Image: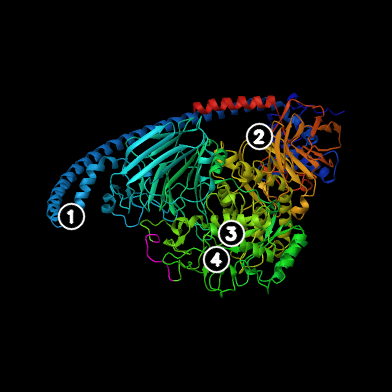
Amino acid sequence: MAKRFQPPLYMRKCNSSLFVAGEAYCGLWLPPVHMLHVDKDTSAKMSKKSSEFVAVFTRRNHQGNPEESQETLLSESGDNQSMVTWTDTSIKAYFKHILPYASPIFLIIKWIGYLVMFILTTYVLLQCTQYFKEAKIQQEHIYEELNSFHVNAEEKLKELNDLQETMEDKLENINILTEQGSKRIKDMFTFSKTDLLKDYEEDNGEQCDFIPLNLRFDCHPENGASELSCRNRGCCWNVLHQLHYEKLVPLDVPYCYYPKNWSLYKYQNFSKDGNDFSGLLSLERDSFYKKDLKLVKIEATGIDDTTLRVKIFDPMNKRYEPPFPARSDPRPFMKKTSNPLYELKMDENVPGFKVMRSSDKRTLFNSIGFGGFIFSDQFLQISSVLPSHNIYGLGEHRTNLRLNTNWQKLTLFNSDQPPTENANLYGSHPFYMVVEKTGKAHGVLFLNSNAMDIILQPTPAITFRSIGGIFDIYFFAGPTPADVLKQYSEIVGKPFLPPYWSLGFHLCKYGYGTLEKTKAVWQRTRDALIPFDTQWNDLDYMDNNNDFTYDKTKFKDLPNFIQEIHDAGMHYIPLIDAGVSANEKNGTYIPYDEGVKRGIFIFDGESNEPFKGKVWNTVSTTWPDFTNPETTSYYTEMMSNMHKDFEYDGAWIDMNEPSNFYNGHINGCKATSLDNPPYLPNVNGNLLARKTVCMNAKQHFGNHYDLHNVYGTSQAVVVNHALKQIRNKRPFIISRSTWEGHGFYAGHWTGDVYSAWHDLRMSIPEILAYSLFQIPMVGADICGFDGNTTVALCNRWMQLGAFYPFSRNHNSDDTIDQDPVAMGQLVVESSKKALRIRYRLLPYLYTLFYRAHRYGETVARPLFIEFNEDPMTFNIDTQFLWGSCLMITPVLEEGKTEVHVYIPRGLWYNYHTMEFSFTIGKNYTLDAPMDTIPLLVRGGCIIPVQEPSVTTTLSRQKPFGLLIALDEHESAKGELYWDDGDSLDSIEKKEYNLFEFEVSNNVLTSTVIECSFDDKMKLGTITVMGISKVVKQVFFNDKDVEFEYDKEKSVLYVNNILVDFTRKFELRWSYKKIEDPLTTTALPIQKYSTSHPADVDASHNEGQYMNSAPTYSSSITYASLLNLIIIKYFMSIYCAHQ
């Protein structure tokens, strides 16, 4: 019997199934045959045996021998080198033929291996030693070169000093000659440049030295600055070469800048009591702007422990102050401060003030000695340094959410201007919030409605430069961003509570042209089963483009169509322009005749006639003055008459900046100081009256010069009142022009955006900025307004638009139809999918609007509001949150099927697959198929949901559900607000239901906070995500109930509950016994998927990204973790030594 081969001990009981010659085998290295040093005869025999073995093995493999696996044989001709991959069976066959010839030399090979390793190690050490020696030599050479350079530099410096002394001698001679010449010129002129420079140098020479570039505050903001004009203002002059490319940075470092502690005023007297301050300033010298105020009063008042007001005004004469927002006068709701979060500091010698945070003494605002405080009739200026570059707000502009502080100029002056960069747009909001790297925040509201420039510079610092009014500044101490917004809402007013139906999808197009086309679009959208609530009509429904009318020919059956809309549980909204036709025949157009009779129009500045321009009306247009109390009754009557003609449900107010197709009158505006002020902000077209009315036009509350920026909001106030009177239901108003406090009355859409991917991307920061301004009902025209959209763009825009707080598809008359059905099947299915998610989440969205209305919280929320201690969130504006629980991460680039997003620390769930992942706060890549928008649910949230239908009316009749996402502590909280969705003052009348939900220790409990609205609310389903242990039993109100548990996704389903949602309930579950408690879960795979679980391919190779959401698939023992820690420790010691 042939002797069987017995492998050495080190090869027995090996778990590996692969053997590769020349590689490690079970932790040991075995050399290939060609490396064995044997005699010539033995080598020949080994080669022969090897060839025979390979031939036999290959033949068996080709015959499909079931006992032997296929192997790969790689051979290179000429040198008999081979690499063979074998199975265990093949290894035995190989050694059976080869071992008799090789066994005598295994011991030799072992020691040769040791010797080779020793030689290699020695060689590496010698190389390292030589490397360090060479590095040291190079270091010495560098030091020698540096010393040589230093010596040369000292010699050059000495030469420069000698040259400087020579130049100073020559300059002294020049100064002597200049002084002699100036004495001769002085006889002919009353002043001289030399005298001015000399006086300036005596007064300000030292104060101009060593002012850093970032601390240069512009002393000559008008064009045409020169050294003479600069120093004539008492400022520093130092010309620098252009520091930035003009396309990237619109402002350069100022040549003319204020010296340290520059001041026009001095205190006459002052008194201070804690944070309350009162002082009088008297003018010491002129500012070179006309009509400086001779006497100025500063009053600082603590409104409560979080809000400080500093008001700087004329104590002798009443100056203009904005009539809105209504709560800007805080006296009725002032509270006695007991533990203020702020401190006010003053300087007895230098006017200005400093606001600090009490807890850490951080300076939030400091105008003492910075910039130039100026208070003239048409030029007001104040500057301050800022504690951080993270500044937000100051809208409306087309910018990123976090503003650029690198010498940026932001202009506030409402204008009919499609959203573009570096332009003043439809709204003005002089409010900003700063977030420090620690996460602490504060806010500042400069309540001044005149046209203004705001300068941001990299100090960081800010300058407000207004052309009228007073300084009325509110400081909100936070300390969190959410706290700041709540405090800000106490001054400007909290947002209105919208009707429930307004949260549905809206559809419109300018250019339907006829009622038949409107009906066709409405019907085909419904036929496609796309969730849809409100049909709109643009200008073309009107008779001759006149407000409060409808075309009795092209839209003759409009009243019946609106009734059909109402019968379907849907709503209708028409456009109402701000301007009224001013050229209709007497007695044929009541809105104009009645307006003239009541005297409610804006008057021309040069006469007592209504101011006339032109918008869409055929000949001319005039504008109601909404600051006139009589206009409220007039407008209510006009809107009531229109409602009798056709029963609309809301109002879309447009062109209310106000917009004008002329620059003032048809022939322009008269040259007055109002239309041509001493300082002109950087407005579009360099003309205040561009596409609006003349600044000297007269209104009830003052000149249009002062009131321009509040015009749109003043219209919203009147329309809000009118709708309440007419419908006796909650008003729903969308306006283009906005001002502070606008969200108390109406929402906003972002105007005439272009159908482009850039506009899609920029719509997010625009919407988030308006959320900061307490105007949460905001959205952009989905798919774009101007220009033709594309299928790809409209597809992704419908997905994103489904998560705008105000969701409406709308475009212009000279573009293609872009309603979902018109764009094709991909857009239809994508829209349906996204909107069904929106409608399912409407109870949650409605609760967010309730919290905005009640507490001033945001609805569409920037990540930094929720994660203010994570600096990575400070600059994110391509993704956003609904409240604190749902993250929207849209595709914003053409052709992409994945998105790169930042996910803050915590447990997050893929909304589509319900699978979860824990993240420490890092960037991830999410799958985004063409029909899907990636959504993430935050752990720790309980989201109220409702089975979606095609309208909100039908959805409200469906059972509710709770979508629970457990956090890492297996807990969660949530809330639901519910009322009839349309009644006035539901909260004040206590006609609502409010429930709180909480999960802790495997128990879900509901708490009824308020239950005064009688509605048949049924709880149908409860879904709990993130239960990693197998559920054994579930009890609802102590009764055993059926359930489903998905082990792969760790999700518990409890369906068909159908109990009274208004009653308190409890859900409890228990787990099966855990088998292996000594393992812990690995970190997640770094890729999500929005695929349905059934679509997941389970056959992926190891190491590849999976198409499913991140799962917990690996186990790491504590011993392995300890080994990793030890290895890391020694590596750190080694690296530190090197």
Residue 574 image offset from top left, x and y in percent = 65, 63
Q: Amino acid at mark 1?
A: Thr
Discs 4/2, front: 4
Query: Pointers 3 and 4 in contact (CB under 8 A)?
Result: no
List the residue tagged with mark 4: 595
Q: CA distance from mark 3 to mark 4?
A: 11 Å
Q: Earlier in the sequence, mark 2 or mark 1?
A: 2
Residue 517: which disc?
Answer: none
User: Is 276 situated above or below 947?
Assistant: above
The amino acid marked with disc number 3 is Ser
Q: Amino acid at mark 2?
A: Met
Q: Which residue is located at x 69 percent, y 29 percent?
A: 27
781 left or right of 183 in image: right
158 magenta-colored: no
Residue toward you, 486 or 582:
582
Q: State which region is magenta.
A: 667-675
